[in-house]
Image (cartoon, helix red, strand yellow):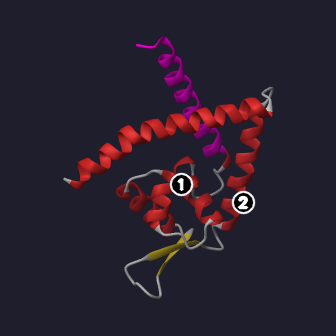
Amino acid sequence: MNDGFSDIQKYISIFDRLMRMYYDRELSGFEIGWGQQFYIEYLYDHPGATPQEMAQFIRVDSATLTKIIRKLTEVEYIRVKSDARDRRVKHLFLTDKAVPAAEKVKRIHGDFYEILSAGISAEEMDAAVQTLRQMAENVTQKVWHKRERHHDK
């Protein structure tokens, strides 16, 4: 086993916990937290996206996505609209109530990036992003695609 793996795993876990705490605290005045902020931001940037588009971008299974959509609909943060040509296709939109939360998420992202990148050059941050992107792709190829094949059986 590569000794570096335990460090990578440890720091990913630390980032995850600290980001959850930071986002949950910053979003406490809204009806969303860490788990929902990704979806709010995606719809803010991609109004009318389909659930399938969101699932592919965020890399989440359909059961989790359905649960999130249900919660965000219940708190009146999103509305679901059927496609005019194909009623089976659903499009998701933020409501006016959700826009302040989405704007807050955007501000939190900027603030957290400033904290995260303090003392690190732009080149180092770019390299870190590229490395993390490749790691995510590596894991996706092994985990996500196996999950899809497992569900197709």
Vertical comparison of 143 with 75: above or below = above
Task: Give the residue furthest to the left.
Answer: 153
Q: Does the magenta run of residues contain 90?
A: no
Q: Where residue 152 appears, x then y in whole percent?
A: 23, 55
Tell me the SS state at disc 2.
helix
Residue 64 placement: quadrant: bottom left
Q: Which mark is residue 92?
A: none
Q: Main secondary structure of the magenta part?
A: helix
Start-end of magenta stretch: 1-25
Q: Where residue 37 appears, x then y in whole percent?
A: 58, 54
Q: Which mark is residue 36?
A: 1
Location of the N terminus (image quadrant)? top left
Other residues around mark 1 within 10 Å, as few (<14) / some (14–19) / many (≥20):
some
* Amino acid type, callout 1: Gln
* Amino acid type, callout 2: Glu
Q: Where residue 108 appears, x then y in whole percent?
A: 71, 48
Residue 52 placement: quadrant: bottom left
The alpha-carbon separation of the residues under discs 1 and 2 comes to 14 Å
Would you name the residue on which mark 2 appears?
103
